[in-house]
Image (cartoon, rainbow, N blue to C red):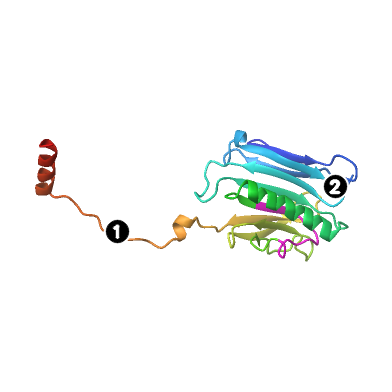
Amino acid sequence: MDGFSIFRGDRKGEGCKTRGGGVCLYVNHRWANPNNSHIKLTACSPNLEILTVNIRPFYLPREFSNIVYNVVYIPPNANDSDVTEQLVNIVQEQEDRWPDAAAYVLGDLNHVTLRDHLPHVSQHVTVPTRKEKTIDLCYCNTPDSYKSYQLPCLGDSDHNMVHICPKYRPTLKTESTKTKTVQKWNADTEDTLKACFEST
């Protein structure tokens, strides 16, 4: 697509699912310079497909250094405990490496939940994404920061698209207003100050 960079996690190697192409992430050039978006990890196994992209957009709230997206696909027959441990380890390594990043885990997680293993992250998709189930999820380390809306399926997909809108407010806007008293110089005090400088 014009105006977007595409980052791909193609299905390669033994044990990867053969149907479908893998996971990907599109990044709008108006949001981030392509030179500031980099793939940090791609992996494909019978339990987990993951693509990690580190992005520094043109604008970020000052409390964040960068954004880390983990685009994930977990097959329905994946081993719950194995894939959860693997994914949690990846996220914790990223938190050690980029402690001030806004971090996301998003994609088709099927039956796997991170709520009990990463209690500091919030899940923001609240609408059904496949029939009556919500299996396409978006975890983020900023609580109460997004709202989600259901959109129609794209092409032949049996998953609904999800539009996630930010409702996050930067720390600067959520802090209470502070009032400071500032002393203003009048003409007499300015003359006195000038005289002091002239005599030194």
The answer to whether residue 107 is seen in the rendering is: no
Residue at position x 58%, y 45% from top?
66
Which residue is label 1 attached to?
180
Q: In the rendered image, which quarter contains the C terminus? A: top left
Answer with left or right where residue 100 lies relative to residue 91: left
Question: Residue 78 sits in which quadrant?
Answer: bottom right
Question: Residue 180 sits in which quadrant?
Answer: bottom left
Which residue is label 2 attached to?
45
Q: Position of residue 178 (x, y in %)?
A: 35, 61
Which secondary structure class fits the magenta region best? loop
Q: N-terminal of the two: label 1 or label 2? A: 2
State the CA–CA distance, disc 1 to disc 2. 58 Å
Q: Is residue 106 magenta?
A: yes
Q: Is residue 70 above or below residue 149?
A: above
Q: Is residue 110 above or below residue 156?
A: below
The answer to whether residue 85 is seen in the rendering is: yes
Span of residues in magenta: 104-117
User: Given the current orientation, which residue lies at the most extreme top position?
Assistant: 35
Q: Is residue 161 above or below residue 30?
A: below
- Disc 1 element: loop
Mark 2 residue type: Ser
Mark 1 residue type: Lys
Q: Position of residue 140 (x, y in %)?
A: 64, 56
Q: In the rendered image, which quarter contains the N terminus? A: top right
Q: Is residue 4 above or below residue 142?
A: above
Question: Residue 123 sits in which quadrant?
Answer: bottom right
Residue at position x 88%, y 47% from top?
17
Bin the neighbour count of mark 2 within 10 Å (Cα to Cα): few under 14, some 14-19, many 20 and up: some
- Disc 2 element: loop
Q: Position of residue 70 (x, y in %)?
A: 70, 48
